[in-house]
Image: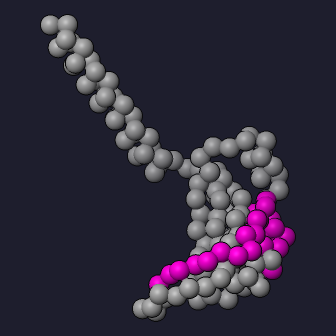
Amino acid sequence: MVCKFLSASHSLAKARNLFSKIFVVLNFSSMEFKYCVVLITTPPEEAEKIANLIVEKKLGACTNIIKEINSIYWWQGKIEKDKESLLIVKTRTDLFEKLKEEVKKVHPYTVPEIIAMPIIAGNEDYLKWIDESC
């Protein structure tokens, strides 16, 4: 009887663990996040201009520029390969739509990559600095 109890108890613990993981995933999808990281690819010669625009207009507290990445992607039915720069913007989520609009005005691509990912946790001092800088 003790073995059956331990086995049932073990199964219950596994089920609770699985349920808590499912809950976390579902809960994240409905949570509102105050801060986000925005990724923007650009031609290398446009990266600094776009990064400056973002910071000057206070749409991001900081924009990092990774000067050269190799991108492989589908475009108009063909696989393309290009050298691009990657901008990494730290900002508030409520500024994303305005940031996207401003970048699209000056970005040379027909379909620019401008995607946001939530910051789910971070150094509180850094997050406060984002608030103060945007």
Q: Residue at x 58, y 59 (%)?
A: 117
Expressed as whole percent of the image width and height from the top left, the position of residue 96 reads 65, 65
In the image, 66 versus 12, the foreground residue is 66
> Would you place residue 4 above or below residue 66 in this image?
above
Answer left or right for 64 relative to 96: right
In the image, 45 versus 92, the foreground residue is 45
Answer left or right for 77 relative to 64: left
Q: Residue furthest top?
A: 2
Answer left or right for 65 relative to 116: right
Magenta stretch containing residue 61, yes or no?
A: yes
Magenta stretch containing residue 42, yes or no?
A: no
Residue 88 appearing in the image: yes
Expressed as whole percent of the image width and height from the top left, the position of residue 33 reads 59, 50
> Would you place residue 62 above or below residue 125 in this image?
below
Q: Residue at x 74, y 74 (%)?
A: 67
Per the rendered image, the range of residues in magenta is 49-74
In the image, 114 versus 101, the foreground residue is 114
Residue 94 appearing in the image: no
Q: Residue at x 64, y 64 (%)?
A: 38
Expressed as whole percent of the image width and height from the top left, the position of residue 130 reads 77, 53
How many labels, in total?
A: 0
Answer left or right for 4 relative to 120: left
Expressed as whole percent of the image width and height from the top left, the position of residue 94 reads 65, 59
Where the N terminus falls, by quadrant? top left
Q: Residue furthest left?
A: 1
Where the C terminus falls, by quadrant? bottom right
Q: Residue at x 45, y 91 (%)?
A: 78
